[in-house]
Image: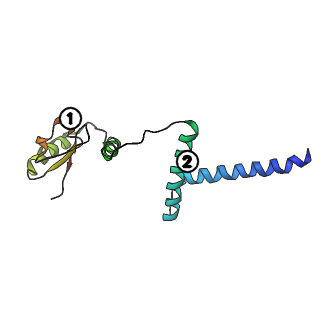
Amino acid sequence: MLRLIKPIFWTFLFLVMMLVIDQVLVQVPPIHPAHTAVRNFYQDFRSRLTDFTFGEKKATPKSIEAVIANQQKETVPKKTEPTKGQQAEATAAPKAEKGQRYIYSDGKGELHFADSLDDVPDGYRGLAQPMGK
């Protein structure tokens, strides 16, 4: 019985150390670029390992259009109720920038260009982005 105490102790100590390192890499905000790189790698590795272990498999996109569509879904800002001042600015902004062109993606992932925000269909105005001049 005494022979088992030493390996059990070192195994327990190893697991505690791994848990501490895990929590440091997950919860401590990085202050150095090397820490940022290691943290990003570890979090990606951890999420993939968790998905592999528990069978939560994410569907991988089969084309570049699918990748773009997934990124657009993730970056769409949530709409909030505008204040009176913001409503006044919103109505004045399209009139001030008539020469501004816009780009947007439809439901199929195809890119479209518009000469003004009024030319963008209502359903895609939230996704329309102004193009550089």
Describe residue 104's horizontal placement relative to residue 52 as left or right. Answer: left
Q: Secondary structure at mark 1?
A: helix
Q: Position of residue 105 (x, y in %)?
A: 23, 43
| 1 or 2: tag closer to the N-terminus | 2
- Nearer to us in this view, 83 or 9: 9
Residue 26's disc is none
* Kind of residue at badge 1: Gly
- For the point 25% across and 38% down, the residue is 108
Q: Which residue is mark 1?
A: 123
Q: Quadrant of residue 87?
A: top left
Q: Nearer the viewer, residue 83 or 108?
A: 108
**Which residue lies under the disc numbered 2?**
46
Residue furthest to the right: 2
Q: Quadrant of the N terminus?
A: top right
Q: Is residue 32 visible?
A: no
| Vertical order, 24 against 66 (above or below) | below
Bin the neighbour count of mark 1 within 10 Å (Cα to Cα): few under 14, some 14-19, many 20 and up: few
Q: Is residue 91 visible?
A: yes
Label 2 sits on what residue type? Arg
Label 1 to label 2, Cα distance in Å?
37 Å
